[in-house]
Image: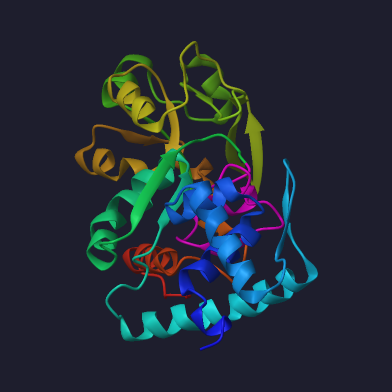
Amino acid sequence: MTQKNRIDFADLKVFLSIVRWGSFKSAAKELGLTPSALSHAIRRLEDRLGAKLLNRTSRAVSPTFLGLDLAERLEDGFNKIGAALETFEAPGVGNLGEIRLNVFADAADLLIAPAVPEFVRRCPGVRLTVVVDNRPIDIVAEGYDAGIRYGHHVPKDMVALPLSGPQRWVLVASPGYVEQHGAPMTIEDLEHHTCLQLLLGDNSSFRWELQVEGERRKIRVPGLVTINDTATTISAAKAGVGIAYVLEARITPELKSETLRLILPQHASAEDPFHIYYGSRRYNHPALHTLINIIREQQTLPNLL
């Protein structure tokens, strides 16, 4: 048996992950291993192949010419293996490593939370980490496998897949607030009301976006209460603190129970669908594909992967 015949499949996976991330630390997070273990795996793989695969400095990791060629071939191979396993729903598909997601709060509530039970059933060996974060971040630099944002917030160099249909932002208030202050009849009337301010992930104040004669108009509204969390905003609106600007999908129970009512519904604003995005079209953890399909199934969208 030659040295090449004794190459460990896991070592190849380690090598490909390091090339993908350009970092031992990020690859270690993805695989659930230590950077030291990855270093040993690469040394073992290079010894068995008799070739240098990675150029390593204190600041960066990059593949050699031979390493890049091997990585490209391995990506194709791993994708084919993953597709074959998913096709037959083989036990253990995606039982390796960890999926780390960075998700903004509304998507976590509407998409991730309902999908988790089914994901755990289908991929019992996967470590799923979901970080709820409304900040705009570089998911690759911060070690995430994927992120979820609205389509227009996805960086241009990322692969993006829709997870939902278009979303709608609406104005709502409690019956008590309307009884005490009346309901605004026009956008201009909002100047005489208390509005719950929305704080963005970068700590800037969000100007409400309303539909006016087929165009989206950004307006500033008065109000002394500023909140960066949808659940808290909904609670404040139900308590009669003021008029809130929220995703309609987040307040379905409140609208049904009439604890909140729509204000100026003719000016509700359409928003892009939720998208999941990641850095490589050709390589991803098979269990990430499974999670995407679960979410799309629950949103009654066709599977894409």
Residue at image x 73%, y 70%? 68
Place residue 138 in its image quadrant.
top right
Viewer-closest of 163 and 11:
11
Q: Is residue 289 above or below residue 181?
A: below
Q: Residue furthest right?
A: 65
Query: What stretch of residues is rendered in magenta?
Result: 138-167
Residue at image x 48%, y 54%? 30
Q: Is residue 229 above or below residue 305?
A: above
Magenta stretch contains residue 145: yes
Q: Residue furthest bottom?
A: 1
Viewer-closest of 176 and 94:
94
Magenta stretch contains residue 207: no
Where is residue 16 shown, x and y percent of the image?
A: 59, 66
Visible residue check, residue 147? no
Q: Residue furthest left?
A: 257
Residue at image x 63%, y 28%? 219
Q: Is residue 216 above or below residue 229?
A: below
Viewer-closest of 301 and 123:
123
Q: 271 left or right of 298? A: right
Visible residue check, residue 260? yes
Viewer-closest of 178 and 159:
159
Residue at image x 60%, y 77%? 74
